[in-house]
Every structure is written in C-alpha cells, then in structure tokens.
Image (tube, coloured by chain):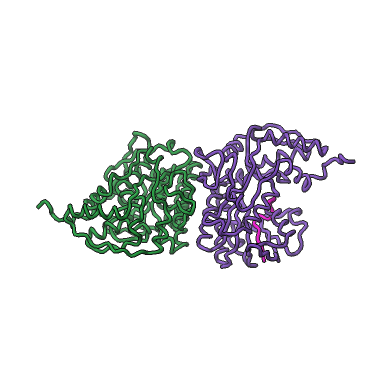
Chain colours: A green, B purple
Amino acid sequence: MHVVITGGGGFIGNRVARELFRRRQLALAPGQAAHIDSITLADLSFSPQARAGFDSTVSFVEADLGDPAAVDALFSRQPAAIFHLAAMVSGEGERDFDGCLRINLDGTRALLEAARRSGLKPRTVFASSLAVFGGSAMPPVATDATRQVPQTTYGMTKAIGELLINEYSRKGFVDGRAARLPTVFIRPGRPNAAASSFASGLFREPLAGVECLLPVPRSVAAPLLGYRRVVENLIRLMECDGEALGDDRSVNFPSTRFLISDMIQVLEKVAARHGIALGPIVDRPDPIVMRIVQGWPVGTEATRANGLGMVADQSVEQVIEDYIEDFASGRKADVKG
Amino acid sequence: MHVVITGGGGFIGNRVARELFRRRQLALAPGQAAHIDSITLADLSFSPQARAGFDSTVSFVEADLGDPAAVDALFSRQPAAIFHLAAMVSGEGERDFDGCLRINLDGTRALLEAARRSGLKPRTVFASSLAVFGGSAMPPVATDATRQVPQTTYGMTKAIGELLINEYSRKGFVDGRAARLPTVFIRPGRPNAAASSFASGLFREPLAGVECLLPVPRSVAAPLLGYRRVVENLIRLMECDGEALGDDRSVNFPSTRFLISDMIQVLEKVAARHGIALGPIVDRPDPIVMRIVQGWPVGTEATRANGLGMVADQSVEQVIEDYIEDFASGRKADVKG
C-alpha cells in the first residue's frame, strides 16, 4: 500500500513516517497487516534531518497544501492511508488569519475533495487539537462531548476540519478519523509559533545548556502527551475499526495534566542523574501566549480513545528520558565512567 | 440605516423584511432605535407576492450567493445590519453535496469576508439550525452546550457557519449572532425540499382542502416554532446586546415539542370552529425524510435565548389561527353569518 503524510517535514509527521518505515506495515482491517510499499511525505520544505535515514521507498514532495493542484498530485499513487498533519500553528494563525484559513481550512477541504475524486475512500487521520475547545462556558476538563467554542483562528479551523472529516466519512468519500491532540512535548529543534511551544522549550533549551524564556506562569497546568505516545496513538487511530468510532469520528487523545513547576522539578532530577548542566529557566510572561494557553482546557478526558487502546504517558520523567535518548544524548555526561 | 436580508425571497426572510418595513426602525444599541432608510432583499429570485406591498425604500437583488461579486455588491450601500438567511435546505443538501457547500459554506464565508472588507463591522444575524445536532451520542433534548455532530450536509454547513460567525466576531470583523432555528411552521405556498417541510404541509394542505402526504409516523415529536415568533426572535437577536452573548454568539431558539398526532387533533378543532373542510392526511412514510427528521433532537432547551427575552408559542392553536389570518382567510366559512 501507499501512504501519504502531509506535514511530513514537521516533527510529528516525520516521526510517524519513521515509525511506519520501521514497521513496514499497517493493518487497515483487524489482524490483516498489509505491506507498506511506499510513503510520500508532503510539506512546504524538508530539512536534511527530515530526509535522512529513509530509502527510496520514501518520497519527499515540497508543496503548498493551499494549492489544489499540489494536493491532487498526492493522489497519483493511490494512497490507501493518509495522515493529514500539515497545518499553520496556533500562534502564527493569530497573526495571519487569511493564511490560517487558506492552509488549514482550504487545504483540508482540498485534500478531502481530492480523496473523494480519487474514488479510493482512503483511510484518513486528521490532526485536530484541544484548541477546538474554549470560551467562558468551557468546563476545565474537556470530554469527547464538550461543545467546541474555539478562541483562536487555529482552533476554529481545526473544529471545521473535524466537521468535514465527519461529513466526508458519512457520505462515504473517505474513512476519516480526527485526533484531538493535547500539547505535544518534547519537540526537538527550535521554538515554533505554536502557543504551546513553551512546553517543549521548557525541557529542550535547559537540556541544551541554553536559556529558556518561560512565557506563562509556573502555576499553569497543561494537558500533555509525549511525542512517542502521540505517534503510537495516531497509528492506532489509523488502524482502529471504523465501526467502533460510529458517526463521530473525532476523539480526544489521552493526556496527563502537569503543572509547570512540577515539570521543572522532574527535569532537574533527570538532569542531575545524567550529569547534564541545565540552562536557566527565566520567567518572561507573554500576554498573547498566556491568553491563548489559558483559554484551553487544563485537562482532557479521553474515554473513547482509551476504549480504542490509546494510552497516556507513565510519567514526565519517561518522556524526558525518551528525548535524551532520541535527541540529546550528545550532552549526557558519562556518569558511569 | 441600511439593512440587507439574504434569502429575502424566502418565507422567513420576506416576513422579516415586512416586519422591519412596518417598524421602520432597529435598535442596535439599547434604547436607541435608529430609522431604517432602506432595505435590500437578496435572493435567487422573487415571486410577485414577495415583491408586493413594499415601497421604493425596499430593493430586490436577484443574485447567487455562491458568486462573490454578487455578495460584494450587497455592501455598496453600507449595511449596518445583515440578516443572512439564504441557504440550501436540508433535503436538497442531501441530494446536492457540492451545491450545499457552495451556497451554505462558501456563500456564508464570502458574505463574512465582504463584511470584513467593508470595515463596517456590521451587526450580522445568521440562521443556523437544530440540524447542527445529531449522532448516536446526542441527548434527546439539545441545550446550548450540546456538542454538534450533524448528520446532514446541511447541518454540517450550519455548524461551520456558527464557527465562522464566532470567529469573525472574535476578530472584530463583524458583530455576529447565530440563531439555531427549530422546525418553523406554518410555511405558506408549496412544499419545499426541507426534510421538516411536512410540519407545515400537515396544516397547510388540509386547510387548503387538498391531500397531505405525511412522510413520518404520527408518533414523531418535533421542536417547533411558529413563524411569527421566529421573526420576532430574529429581530430580537439582532437588537440584543453583544456583551450578553459573550464569546459564544449562537443560541438555541425557543421551541415547543409537539407530537404529530396531537397537532392533527388541534388542527381538526380549529378547522371545525372556522367551518373549514379539511383535506385528508394520508400516511406515506418516506425513509429518507424519516432518517433525517429522526436524527434531530426531539426538543431543545433555550436557556440563553430565554434570558434574552425570546419566547416560544403559547399553543399550536394560536399558530394555526395566525396562519389562517395571514394566508388562508379565503377558505374560512362565514360561520358567524
């Protein structure tokens, strides 16, 4: 089978690609794993790291999902499965309303239309977000049944994406699923324009020995999910039985609610164990980031996702250990030596 | 002030126009009624009846809201208030997916974009629908906080319209409000392609002495609102203080839950009083209409609308009496004579 991953140059998309490349199979019917013959990653651009480590079964398409012709071209190899992860992120969406609608709304619609025209009824996993929730009547913990009153342009486009995924699935044009992602951590590389970027920077910058500017108070709690679990759960959502989802194709992903102050304590403990000298964490409140982040739910209930076998992290500690293993082993002192 | 009404050739849009034409004022700030200088009604076409009874302050624009240039032209006279009621209805939307997205989604977005470009921040009332609710997890009675899992293309486009109204309001591009209309009765004229059309036909056809084919079982209950209340409540929503709506600009309209069998009894009573010989009501179940109608909530809770002073009908009897007075007085026997 052929698999398409939009946003394949981004952190999660690229990790999904690596996991599928490692497994070399997907089970779109229960117990019937099929071989993955090829994977196309689509994104605006790819870093050398994003291209590294694959073989010729993986292709890289540099394309703008706001361009319908580019979206159409993704269907030339008849994908049976599509991970649609490309999006403009929350902070950037607040600054660029038109771009956010073009990429997130028009891009998603163009993808679903191309899927419909293909006649393939592809299995399609769409990355939604907890940012679909918001507003003064929002309960502190969002469930799968919580009404969506997003308070960012990004969240609004994601809520519309969920409605489109449901409708295109109901009509039989795709077999769609939407994952409401909590804040994903720890993203490697550089800070991005997502308002939740601090939840990665909080670990990444100190572990690299550089300063972290913390834009929100340490008393803030956020629903987090480690990147390894995000990737596993996205693949599980792709493989799960559509009947189990019924007429509502969107699920809250599991998350764990952590206080920033607690996370910093765990970070210090792990760093000490590895002999890593942490860079400083400096409080630098940013009203725009605070407004966005404090408008999101502080926790989620993921009853449906749990029923599908999806899991949250055991601990923040484990996610930090994963991150050091995957991305930061260079700075680890040889404490055993 | 100038007022624009899209769908102004339709029943509700035209009734709103007549009520505004009668009042000649709107109070967009509390206690500050302003004179209505002119009204533009936009629709695909207008019947002679829809054009009758107005003076030169009312203009008729025959336009397709799927055409952005036509939408732009509606802003040439700088409307301070827009009733956006034009839409493809539920039954037609199930048959014409692309048309439904073009008219209801692209049309609404084009209107909001034109409003944004105008810089006028117009007060904008959007007609949403209870069809935004649905799905196997829907509670029987939908509240303002009920998650929206529409099971029709029409309902999906209305749910997206609500999200756009919220977002364009949050960004300060318009001062938007969305009315989730229940089934409106009694519509005059001919049956239309709305799945809820039977709730009008049930009264209209027998009162006209012709046969009514009833597509749903008599045991079905539906949340109904008489057309006079719909018009009053739409104007009230236009005039209400935006602060009272907060960050969620959509409200369930009040409705009353009636059983079809009960409605038929009341109809017979009113007809007897007026000496009207009713046409027969013939059960002719239609699986498509039944699926759509039975997918909607059987009742609504309209806490927020009630708080804004909106009301439901006193009785079915009163709505039938209104209808006879407005549209069917010709068939009334002179029982007093």
Q: Which residue is drawn at 73% across and 64% down?
A: B57
Q: In the rendered structure, which segment of residues is drawn in magenta?
A: B1-12
Quadrant placement of the N terminus of chain A: top left
Is residue B323 on the magenta stretch? no
**Percent position of residue A322, x then y:** 24, 49
Seen from the viewer's position, the closer of residues B218 and A86 is: B218
Based on the displayed image, in which of its 4 quarters is residue A89 positioned? bottom left
Residue at the left extreme of this rendering: A337
**Percent position of residue B278, x then y:** 78, 36
Q: In this view, does B48 lie to the left or right of A33?
A: right
Q: Is residue B109 left or right of residue B28?
A: left
**Percent position of residue B19, x then y:** 72, 56
Q: Can residue A78 be seen in this view?
A: no
Report the label total.
Answer: 0
Q: In this view, does A294 lie to the left or right of A322?
A: right
**Percent position of residue A157, x then y:** 46, 54
Q: Which residue is drawn at 74% across and 59% down?
A: B22
Is residue B5 on the magenta stretch? yes
Seen from the viewer's position, the closer of residues A275 and A110 is: A275
Q: Is residue B214 visible?
A: yes
